[in-house]
Image: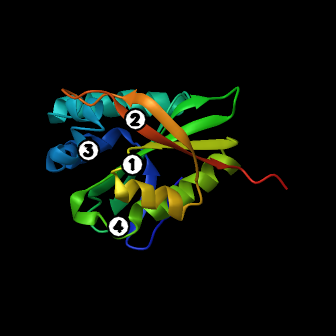
Amino acid sequence: MQVNLGSYYISPIRSKDGWSICNFTSANEDRLKRYFPKTLEQNLTPDLSNIFVEKKVKQFNDKEEFLYTIKQNEGHKVAGLIYIKEVDWTKKQGEFAYAIDYNFEGKGLTTKAIKQLSEHAFEILELETLQAIVHKNNIGSIKVVKNNNFTWIKTLKNEFTPPGEKPLDMELYELYKKIE
């Protein structure tokens, strides 16, 4: 599966993505350290990134978690990562988590990618509910979910604890498969 987004494309994580993900996490360390600390710590070196990628490829193939990359057509540089995680096959539910390279912020890439991956999740993965858990001050992420017609559900008290900080309240948004 590869989805065209003009000058970019979305594809599932691949075994050969270690170096490019290491480069992405290194360049965006400040952006990732608060909300993606585990992804960051698992990609501090190319060797760690290769281990991370192999684990994510296995999880993808086992349908436990789905990691997608957004890449430039030219040069195939990773511009972003999008997870469909916390997959519950009984409830037919999954949660989006996403990060975009600071060089590509504000171009609508994440919004377009979430739109395409939402359709994929509903049609191919047969999920019925997609969630996004966002901090109220993360204006970019709130725009992404609102531009994709997610509905605000509630505030989750003390939902997430960034490294070295007190627990944060997070906002739960959901998108539902349209039943025809």
Residue 10 appears at what percent x and percent y?
Answer: 44, 57
Residue 88 appears at what percent x and percent y?
Answer: 62, 28
Work out how far the residue at label 4 is from the one at label 1, CA to CA, in angstroms.
Answer: 33 Å
User: Which one is in front in this view, the residue at disc 2 or the one at disc 4?
Assistant: 2
Left or right: residue 103 compared with residue 89: left
Residue type at tag 2: Asp
Work out how far the residue at label 1 is from the one at label 2, CA to CA, in angstroms.
Answer: 8 Å
Residue 169 is labelled as 2
Element type where label 2 sits in the image: strand
Q: Which residue is mark 3?
A: 21
Q: Which residue is mark 1?
A: 136
The one nearer the camera, 39 or 10, is 39
Element type where label 3 sits in the image: helix
In the rendered image of this protein, does residue 171 appear above or below residue 104? above
Residue 97 is labelled as none
User: Which one is in front in this view, the residue at disc 3 or the one at disc 2?
Assistant: 2
Q: Quadrant of residue 17?
A: top left
* Colour pattern: rainbow
Residue at image location 33% in from the left, 53% down from the top: 80
Residue type at tag 3: Ile
Residue type at tag 1: Lys
Estimate how packed mark 3 is, as few (under 14), some (14 to 19) or many (20 or more) residues with alpha carbons within 10 Å.
many
Left or right: residue 64 compared with residue 138: right
Work out how far the residue at label 4 is from the one at label 3, CA to CA, in angstroms.
Answer: 16 Å
Element type where label 4 sits in the image: loop
Q: Which residue is mark 4?
A: 73
